[in-house]
Amino acid sequence: MIYISDKAKEKIVKLRQDAGLDSTYFLRVGVVGGGCSGLSYKLDFDNETQPNDQVFEDQGEKLVTDLKSFLYLCDTTLDFSDGLNGKGFHFSNPNASRSCGCGESFAV
């Protein structure tokens, strides 16, 4: 399962509306190679699922990830911060053994 915080849900809804996307669009969460710790998170809106996608729903929001990324994202919570210490989406990932200072990449 991938979870989403209240603040992240609010921001996703706003971003979807600002982009003029309808409710058929969901948040695709992925993991790609790169970043200072080796792996980076990727977020995007999508409206088509693929055969090996893992589909979750939390807080009324549909979250989709590919099977390979799910191995790294299992039990992760997506959060959003708009504070002075950094604005943006953040991942609370229990599978990460370390992450970089900016929180955009991690290692397992």
Image: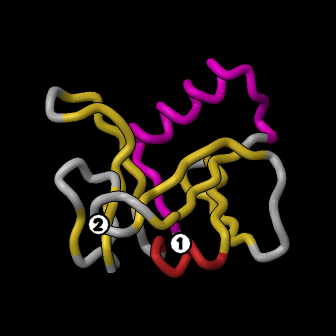
Residue that carries the numbered disc 1 in the rendered image = 1
| Residue displayed at 47% across by 71% down | 73
Amino acid carrying label 2: it is: Ser
> Looking at the picture, does residue 8 appear above or below residue 57?
above
Q: Which residues are magenta?
A: 2-24
Query: Which residue is nearer to you in this view: 4 or 44?
Result: 44
Residue 16 screen position, x and y as percent: 64, 29
Q: Is residue 54 above or below residue 40?
A: below
On screen, residue 64 versus residue 100, left or right, reads right
> Is 55 left or right of 34, judged from the image as shown?
right
Q: Position of residue 56 (x, y in %)?
A: 64, 64
Q: Which residue is mark 2?
A: 37
In which quadrant is the C terminus drawn? bottom left
Q: How is the image coloured?
A: secondary structure
| Residue 88 vertical position relative to residue 33 in the rendered view, above or below | above
Three-letter amino acid code at disc 1?
Answer: Met
